[in-house]
Image (cartoon, rainbow, N blue to C red):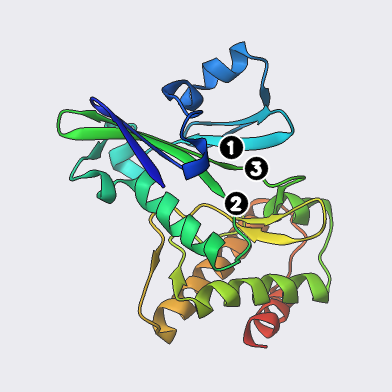
Amino acid sequence: MLIDTQGARVLFFQDELKDEITSEYFDGAYWQRNNAIIGSAFGRGITWFFKINNDEFVLRHYHRGGLIGKLIKDGYCYTGLKNTRAYQEFLVTQQLVDKNLPVPQPIAGQVIKHGLFYRADLITQKIAGANDLVAVLKDRALNQVDYQQIGAMIRRFHDVNLWHADLNTHNIILDGDGKWWLIDFDRCKFKPAADAWKQANLARLKRSFVKEKNKDTAFKWQTTDWDLLLAGYQN
C-alpha cells in the first residue's frame, strides 16, 4: 500500500496505482460526468458502481448509523490515519485477499480531515454478476449444497480468526459463476481464537435470516435450512 498526503486529504492505494489515483476517483459526480456509472445502491448513503475499461469497481462513502448518525452524518473522530475506518478496512480486506479468501480486492481509500473529525471513502473491486443472499432467496430457494457452501465459506473466515462486525444476509454474495463471497469489512478484526465470538457471529447471521423472513414472505428460507448451513460450517 502507498500513502499520498495532500494537506488535510490522505489517499492510500495499491502500489501499482501510484500514478493513477487522484481525489476525483472518490467523487461519484466525476464518474457520472465520464459516463462510467453502471449502477448504484442506496443504504445510509449512495454506493456507486463504476467501470474503467473492462474493470468494475464499488465506491462507498462512510456514513454513521443509529442515533448518532442522525446528529453526525459522516464525521468520525480523528486519532491518526491508521485508526480510521477506511484504512483499517483496507488493511483487513487485503490480509484476507492474501489468505486467498473470497473477498473483493481493496483498491484505494481516502480520508479527509476536518479539525478533530474526518470523512472517508473506499473503492473496492466489484464482484461480477453479484447478488446478495437476500435477493437470491427472494428469487429462489437454495438447496443443501448451497447452504453447505455458505457454511463452509464462513468457517474459512473463522479459521483465520476473522470476526465480522456485521455478518448478515446482505453481506453474503453470490457471483455470476455460482461462487459465494463475503463483503463489508468495516470494523472487522482478527481476534484470538475462541468459540464464544464465533458462535455469537453465527447467531447474528441466524437472526438476519429470521428478520428477512419476517419482513417478506417471498424470502424462501425456513429454520431447517439453518441446520444445512451449520453442517457445512462444521464439516
Which residue is pictured at 68% across the width and 88% down the height? 235
Element class at badge 1: strand
**Residue under numbered circle 2:** 104
Element at badge 2?
Answer: loop
User: From the viewer's perspective, is residue 38 above or below residue 230?
Assistant: above
Of callouts 2 and 3, the N-terminal one: 2
- Residue 233 lies, in percent from the top left, at 64, 81
Residue in the image at 74% along x and 33% along y = 54
Q: Nearer the viewer, residue 211 or 159?
A: 159
**Amino acid under disc 3:** Lys
Q: CA distance from mark 2 to mark 3?
A: 7 Å
Q: Position of residue 144 (x, y in %)?
A: 81, 76
Mark 1 packing: few (<14 Cα in 10 Å), some, or many (20+)?
A: many
Task: Tell me the residue that label 3 is attached to.
Answer: 126
For residue 147, above or below residue 59: below
Q: Residue furthest bottom?
A: 235
Q: Reading the chain from its start, which is encountered first: label 2 or label 1?
A: 1
Kind of residue sitting beneath label 1: Val
Q: Amino acid at mark 2?
A: Pro
User: Mark 3 and mark 1 in contact (Cβ < 8 Å)?
Assistant: yes
Image spot of residue 101 (x, y percent): 60, 66
Quadrant position of residue 155: bottom right
Crowd rating for badge 2 (residues with CA inside 10 Å; few <14, some 14–19, many 20+): many
Q: In terms of depth relative to the viewer, which is nearer, 52 or 145? A: 52
Give the secondary structure at mark 3.
Answer: loop
Which circle marks residue 58 in the picture? 1
Tags 2 and 1 in contact by the CB under 8 Å rule? yes
- For this orientation, the residue located farthest to the top is 33
